[in-house]
Image (cartoon, rainbow, N blue to C red):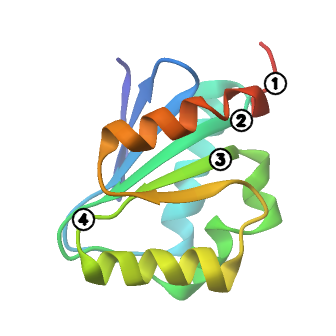
Amino acid sequence: MPRLELEACTIDLLDGDVAHVHFRDGRTVQVEEVRRMFEALEAERKGRKVLLLVSVGEGTTMSNEARAYASSPESNVYVAADAIIVRDFSHQLAANVFVRHHKPTRPIQMFPDKASALDWLRQHHHLIDPA
C-alpha cells in the first residue's frame, strides 16, 4: 500500500479508490496544508477523484478556513465522498461543524471506526470515473 508523507498528514492509498488521510497529532490544520493534501492526491491519482477516509491525531483540529476550503466546490474536483472517523465527543462536535455549517455538496458521513467508514465509502465507488 503506497504511503505519501506530508508535513501535516500521511496519505495511505488503499484498494478501491480509497485514500486514508491521517492528520498528525497536535496540529491546527491550515488551508495550505489541506491544499497540499489535495494536490498530492491529484498527482498520485492523475486527476481521478478519490473516496476519502479522514482521521485526525490527538489534539488535532482544523482551522475554520481549512474546513471551509475542504468542503468547498473546488474540493469536489478531488473527492467523491468523505468518511470521517470520530474518536471522541469533542472531535464529533468539530466534525458536525464541518458537515452542518460548511455543507459539502458531496456525500459525507461520520463513523466510530475505520471498518464501518470503509464499508460506507465502498458503497459510493460509483461516483468515481472509470480509469
Q: What x and y, as percent, mark residue 108? A: 61, 57
Using the numbered discs, state the Cα–Cα distance from disc 4 to disc 3 in whole angstroms.
20 Å
Q: Residues within 10 Å of mark 4 (few under 14, many from 20)?
A: some
What residue is disc 3 on?
Answer: 81
Looking at the image, is mark 1 or mark 4 earlier in the sequence?
4
What residue is disc 2 on?
Answer: 49
The kind of residue tagged 4 is: Arg
Q: What x and y, as percent, mark residue 63? A: 47, 83
Q: What x and y, as percent, mark residue 22? A: 33, 51
Using the numbered discs, state the Cα–Cα distance from disc 3 to disc 1 in whole angstroms.
13 Å
Hey, which quadrant is residue 84 in on the image?
A: bottom left
Hey, which quadrant is residue 34 in on the image?
A: bottom right
Find out whether the residues at labels 4 and 3 contact each other: C-beta distance under 8 Å: no
Query: Residue 114 or 35: which is nearer the viewer?
Result: 114
Camera sees residue 28: no
Say which residue appears at 53% left-offset and 84% top-offset: 97
Up the image or down, 119 lies above or below 38; here it is: above
Find out whether the residues at labels 2 and 1 contact each other: C-beta distance under 8 Å: yes
Looking at the image, is mark 3 or mark 1 earlier in the sequence?
3
What residue is disc 1 on?
Answer: 129
Using the numbered discs, state the Cα–Cα distance from disc 1 to disc 4 in whole angstroms.
31 Å
Find out whether the residues at labels 3 and 2 contact each other: C-beta distance under 8 Å: no
Q: Residues within 10 Å of mark 2 (few under 14, many from 20)?
A: many
